[in-house]
Image (cartoon, helix red, strand yellow):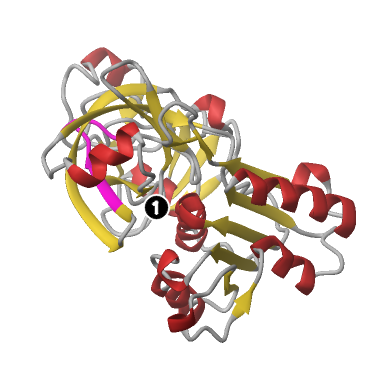
Amino acid sequence: MSHRITIKPSNHAFTTLGDETILEAALREGFALPYGCRNGACGACKGVVLEGSVDYGDYQASALSEHDKQMGKALFCCARPQSDIVIEVKEIGAAKDIPIKTMPCRVQHIERPSDDVIVMYLKLPANERLQFLSGQYIDILLKDGKRRSFSLANAPHDDEYLQLHVRHLAGGQFTDYAFSAMREKDILRFEGPHGSFFLREDSDKPMILLASGTGFAPIKAIVEHALHIGLKRTMILYWGARTRKDMYLPELPQKWQAEHANFTFYPVLSEPAPDDNWSGRTGYVHEAVLDDFADLSAYQVYACGAPAMVEAAHRAFIGERGLPEDQFFSDAFFVAAATADKSK
């Protein structure tokens, strides 16, 4: 049975489906309520039920006391509505609303889609989840106190594992380890989430998504989140790489394009190899956008990748194509001078 849930003070409303918890339904419909563990252990999702009744579900007494329940409080990751309800909770409106955590994680699985890129899946402790906005990043904490930053490639709803896309840069302290010595079950520590690069859901503007290399990672998170919450805005992805093999997951945006009428994908190679047999677009990826759009005044742009690409796009889109300054959102990867690792 479905029930209508109204959030105070925002007056946002959504409907549960089947046996969903309040949190599951809210996240499915794009409302970012605070949470931590998602299994009734931490108390981060605690809020007040102002009207109606709920089944409190399974939770740990340390997270929700009998006094809390008498005060009308519930854990929204566990509670299921038994009627239409009104709840009071502060919604996540910006990155500043999400607590930054430091925690351990286990390398659960490693995939190698190309010779110099790995896709790493990190498993958090049993009673932990990381709340983040699509497009943000985490810092991997190294034993010598240094840190290396990597964008989260998974969308917030798909948070069983944290997914990182790591390109090997010779001499990189962390990437050398990741490609030569890292094994599944290894333990890492990280801090996050960080960053102001995330999907602005309160806009209805069409989006141009610009990625170079592993800058595809946060773009992937943004697209998957947008598709998950049912955004109908036009999304056009330009993904630039040097050669065909450097575009390490081309089948994924091709799948999005085949399944969603509002999504278009343009792969762009700057130096295709002779054996690539490439008949697609060539050159710098931001120039492909310039070729296609004479006026960007009605668009939002999300750009991630090499600093030179991000800077060139920022300069050209705003200066030559009328993109409003406040509608260009970016995250540039740079190389840490001492170790050649990719960082923010």
The residue at the far top in this view is 67
Query: In the figure, 118 relative to 184: above or below?
Result: below
Q: Is residue 122 left or right of residue 98?
A: left
Is residue 48 shown in magenta? no
Q: Quadrant of residue 105?
A: top left
Q: Quadrant of residue 334?
A: top right
Q: Is residue 313 left or right of residue 91?
A: right
Q: Is residue 49 among what the camera can see?
A: no
Instruction: Assess disc 1: are there few (<14), some (14-19) or many (≥20) residues with their C-alpha within 10 Å of its C-alpha.
Output: some
Q: Amino acid at mark 1?
A: His
- Residue found 70% across the figure and 63% down from its top: 206
344 or 155, which is in the foreground? 344
Picture quarter with the N terminus: bottom left
The residue at the far left in this view is 185
Q: Position of residue 94 (x, y in %)?
A: 58, 32
- Residue found 86% across the figure and 69% down from its top: 294
Q: Which residues make up the magenta segment? A: 119-129
Q: Position of residue 283 (x, y in %)?
A: 66, 69
- Residue found 46% across the figure and 53% down from its top: 214
160 or 231, which is in the foreground? 160
25 or 54, which is in the foreground? 25
User: Which residue is identified by label 1?
Assistant: 3
Q: Is residue 249 among what the camera can see?
A: yes
Q: Quadrant of residue 117?
A: bottom left
Q: Position of residue 144 (x, y in %)?
A: 29, 16
Q: Position of residue 37 (x, y in %)?
A: 26, 32
Q: Is residue 335 left or right of residue 314?
A: left
Query: In the figure, 301 relative to 38: above or below?
Result: below
| Circle 1: element type | loop
